[in-house]
Amino acid sequence: MKRKVTLKQIAKELDVSISTVSKSLKNSSEISEDTRLKVQAFAKLYNYKPNNIALSLKNRKTKTIGIIIPEIVHHFFATVISGIEQVANEQGYNVIVCLSDESFDKEVINLEMLANGSTDGFIMSLSKETQQKKDFHHLQEVINQGMPIVMFDRIANEILTDKVIIDDSLAAYQAVSFLIEEKRKKIALITTVDYVSVGKLRTDGYLKALEDNAIEINNDLIVKIEDIENCSNIIDPLLNENKIDAIFAVNELFAVVAIKAALKKGIKIPEDMSVIAFTDGIISKFSTPTITTVSQNGVKMGRKAAEMLIERLENEEEDERYRTEVIETNLIKRESTKT
Amino acid sequence: MKRKVTLKQIAKELDVSISTVSKSLKNSSEISEDTRLKVQAFAKLYNYKPNNIALSLKNRKTKTIGIIIPEIVHHFFATVISGIEQVANEQGYNVIVCLSDESFDKEVINLEMLANGSTDGFIMSLSKETQQKKDFHHLQEVINQGMPIVMFDRIANEILTDKVIIDDSLAAYQAVSFLIEEKRKKIALITTVDYVSVGKLRTDGYLKALEDNAIEINNDLIVKIEDIENCSNIIDPLLNENKIDAIFAVNELFAVVAIKAALKKGIKIPEDMSVIAFTDGIISKFSTPTITTVSQNGVKMGRKAAEMLIERLENEEEDERYRTEVIETNLIKRESTKT
C-alpha cells in the first residue's frame, strides 16, 4: 500500500507548523500568500489527499475522548477509566471506551472508527498482539492527522507521544527488596509470558533486587503463566519441600491462587511464607489473608493521562515536545507479609 | 420545550410504516405518489424537522453498537460487555462503551452523543438516578428516531423495547429456599437501598421464600447498605449473640465483608452459618471460604442482548412486537454453604 503524504510530513518538509499547512490548504487568509502557495504546490506535487476529518479538527471539536484498552474484566483498567472520567467530567469532556480484546486488528478498527469524527484524541493501552507485532502504524497515522494520543501502562517507545507509566522495574525491585528485608531468601516470581512489556520490566526488577542483595538467581523459582485456568498446576510444585519462603506475583490472581494452594498444604502466611502481588485490586482487599500489593494507582494514572490529553487538545500552539509522566507506586501492606 | 413530531408519530397517525414515512420524505419512487404527498403534507403541517441521522439510518449503517452502563468497576457489567463483544465480533459489529456513572445527565449526554451518527443501536442498563427520577424521555426519543434499544438488568417497564433480564425475585427465592433446606431459620438479608429495581425484586423473593416456609419475617434481620465503605458497621451487630444462622447478600462484596467479620467473631462457615451472595464475581471464587453464589450469567445476558439488537438492525421489516428474554440463573455451590 502506497503511503499517503501526511500533513505532518508536509509541515516538516517545508519547516512550518501543521496548523500552517492545514490553514494553507484551506486557503486561510491568516497565512501569507507566499506560504500558502508553497504548501499547496507541495501538496499537489506529492498528491496529498486531504483528510476531511483532520482538516476540520481544529474547527469542529467533539469534546470527546476515546479510550482504547485491551480488556475490561480487569480492575486496573477499570480504575484508570474512573480516573479519566473524573477529569473529563470536570472539564466538560465525554468519554467513549472501546476494547481491543488483546487483538491488533480490533485495536486498528476501533482506532479508525473513533478517529473518524467521534473523538478529539485518544488515551490508549496497547493490546498484547500489538506489542508482539510491534506494528504501530495505526497510532502514527492518527497522530499524523493531528489527533493527540496519550499512551499509558502498555506503551510503545517507538511512538513519539505523551505517555503515563509507572516504573514497573523499580516497583518490582522495591517489592522484592521488601521481601528480602523480611529475611526471605527463596523468593519465587510468578509472572506472565514475556511479550507484554510490563511483564519483562517487572522481571528485571525482581532479578536486580536479588543481585543487589547477593541472592543467587534460581530459574526454577521463576514461573511463567499464560492461562489463569491451569495456573494452580504450575504454581503447586513451587510449594513443595520448603522450596520457597516468599512469592512475588505480577498480578493478584496469581497471588491468591498461590495463597490458597499454600494454605491447603499447611504453609502459614505470613509466618512461613510472605506474598506480595502487583496491582492493587479488589481480591487483595478481601482475600484471607489480605494481600500486600504494589498499587499501580490506576485512578491517578487515568487522571494524569486525561489532564495531558486535554491540555494538548486545548493548547492552540502545536507543541512537539512530548512528556512521559511516571506515576509513583506504593506498597500497600496487608496480612500476607510480616512487617 | 415543544416536542417535535417524530417519524414514528407521523407513521402512527397516517397508519403507515416508519420506513414509508422516511422514504416519502426523501421523495423515494418506491412509495406511491399519493402516500408521498400525504406524508409530506402532514410533516409540513406539524412542522416536522427531519433528523438527518434518522433519515439516513436505513442507508448508512455504522455497524457499531453503543453500550451505556452505570459503571465499569463491577464484574457483572464487565461480563455482560464480554458477551456483547463476542456476538458483535462474530457478526462484524464494533462496540462502543459509555458510562453513566449512575448519573441521569451523563446517561442522556452519552445517549445523544452516540445516537448522533456513531451507532446503529443501543444496549443499556439504567443509572440509579434514572431509575429514581423515572424519566425515560431520552430512550423514547432515540427509539422514535428509529434506533433500536435493548435494555438489560436495570430496565424500565415503561419503555416499549426489547429487554433481557433475569428473574431477580425468583433467583432470590431459590437462594433463600436453599438456605431453608439447609435448616437455616434465622436468615439475614443484606441488601442495598430500594430504588434500584433489582434490589426490590430480590427483597421480594427473600420475603416470599420465608412466607412460603412459614418462617416469621424479622425486620431486624434486613439491613440496607448505601455505602460499601461503612458496611461492616452495619453488618457487625447482626453477628452478635446467635442472632442469625444464614446470610443472603445481594452482592458478593457484602457477603465477603460479612464472612470476614463472622470469622473474626469465631463463627464457623458453613458449620455455624451459611452464606449465599447474588452475582457470581471474582471475589466469591477466591475468598476463603469460597462463596456460594447466584450466577446472573452476565456473558449469556450480553450475548442475548446483542443477538436481539442485531436481529432488529438487520431485519428490513419494522416489527413492533418487543420481546423480554429471561436468562436463567443458577446457584453455584461453594464452601460457604453446607450441601
Image (cartoon, coloured by chain):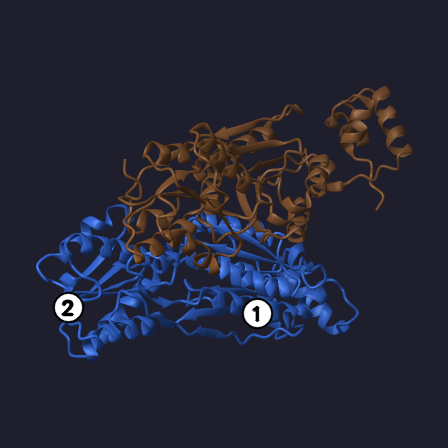
Chain colours: A brown, B blue
How many numbered discs? 2
B191 vs A3: above or below: below
User: Which of the numbered marks, if any, corresponds to residue B307?
Assistant: 1
Amino acid type at image mark 2: Lys
Identity of the residue drawn at 31% across and 44% down: A336
**Name of the residue lying farthest toward the right:** A45
Q: Quadrant of residue B196?
A: bottom left
- Residue B11: horizontal and vertical position, in percent? 61, 70
A30 vs A95: above or below: above
Q: Quadrant of residue B314?
A: bottom right
Amino acid type at image mark 1: Glu
N-terminal of the pair, mark 2 or mark 1, is: 2
- Residue A138: horizontal and vertical position, in percent? 70, 43
CB contact under 8 Å: marks 2 and 1: no
Identity of the residue drawn at 28% across and 38% down: A338
Between B15 and A17, the one nearer to me in the picture: A17
Q: Secondary structure at mark 2?
A: loop
- Relative side of B128 to A32, left or right: left
Q: Quadrant of residue A8?
A: top right
Is any atom of residue A190 visible in this view? no
- Residue A167: horizontal and vertical position, in percent? 50, 32
User: Which of the numbered marks, if any, corresponds to residue A302?
Assistant: none
Give the chain letter at badge 2: B
Q: Secondary structure at mark 1?
A: helix
Q: How packed is label 1: few (under 14 Cα within 10 Å), some, or many (20 or more)?
A: some
Q: Nearer the viewer, mark 2 or mark 1?
A: 2
User: Which of the numbered marks, if any, corresponds to residue B186?
Assistant: 2
Give the chain letter at badge 1: B
